[in-house]
Amino acid sequence: MTRHAELVALSAAQKVLKRKRLQDCTLYSTVEPCPMCSFASREARIGRVVFALSSPVMGGYSKWDVLKDDDLSNKLPEVFGPPPEIVSGLLAAQAEQVWSQWNPLAWRFIKRRGCFGSAADLSERYAAAPRRILSWAALTAFLAAPALAVSKAFLRSRADSKPMTKFDSQPDS
Ligand SMILES: [Zn+2]
């Protein structure tokens, strides 16, 4: 029961990327992630969550305020990342079709109970909370810039002070 597809995807991504934080990654799901997967997504600092069908009965966005709750990251920034960007309703009609073809009986039940939102619902977009953009490449470039400038200036001054006649192919006249 705990091996939800989103959790499996998150840990697979962490293994492949060899890091815990996935702030530059998008989690795609046919149905809105449940609260458990939403908490795990916040812990993994996922940058964007995209899903086709909303889950107004059990979802971690439509029903429970897990994906967009600022309090989590404000009070426990060591544990939870800022709210990710949310895109809902992507390919919703196709997702409904897949569900109804896979198990028509279960689909009718789900629809009757209102477990999933309708593809006719307008797609929604919720902007991500502002987050610090800090990439190691940018940080090392920033830190190394003064050192590089100094070493370039040093090399230039050495080049200036030392005539390069030795490497000149033209003979002295
Ligand atoms: Zn889940």
Image: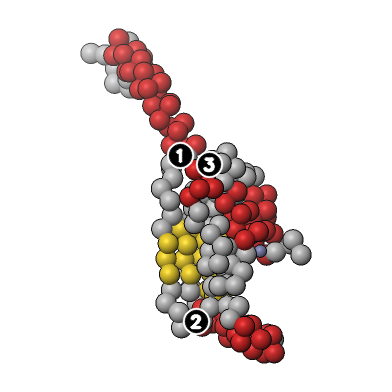
Q: How far apart are marks 2 and 1 (CA)?
A: 37 Å
Q: Residue furthest right?
A: 1
The one nearer the camera, 48 or 166, is: 48
Specify whether 153 is left or right of 52: left
Specify whether 100 is left or right of 128: right
Q: Give the residue type at disc 1.
A: Leu
- Residue at mark 3: 75
For marks 1 and 3, give the one nearer the viewer: 3
Provide the secondary structure element on which disc 2 rests. Answer: loop
Provide the secondary structure element on which disc 1 rests. Answer: loop
Specify whether 94 is left or right of 169: right
User: What residue is drawn where x is 31% and y is 13%?
Assistant: 157
Q: Distance between the residues labelled 1 and 3?
A: 21 Å
Q: Can residue 104 be seen in this view?
A: yes
Q: Height in image: 129 above or below 160?
A: below
The one nearer the camera, 15 or 120, is: 120
Provide the secondary structure element on which disc 3 rests. Answer: helix
What crowding class fits label 2: few (fewer than 14 Cα within 10 Å), some (14-19), or many (20 or more)? some
Where does the image place residue 112, in percent across and percent down from the top left? 61, 87
The scheme the figure's colours follow is secondary structure
Q: Height in image: 140 above or below 28?
A: above
The label on residue 119 is: 2
Where does the image place residue 168, in percent across and percent down from the top left? 32, 20
- Residue at mark 1: 134
Q: Give the residue type at disc 3.
A: Lys
Q: Residue furthest left?
A: 173
The one nearer the camera, 50 or 34, is: 34
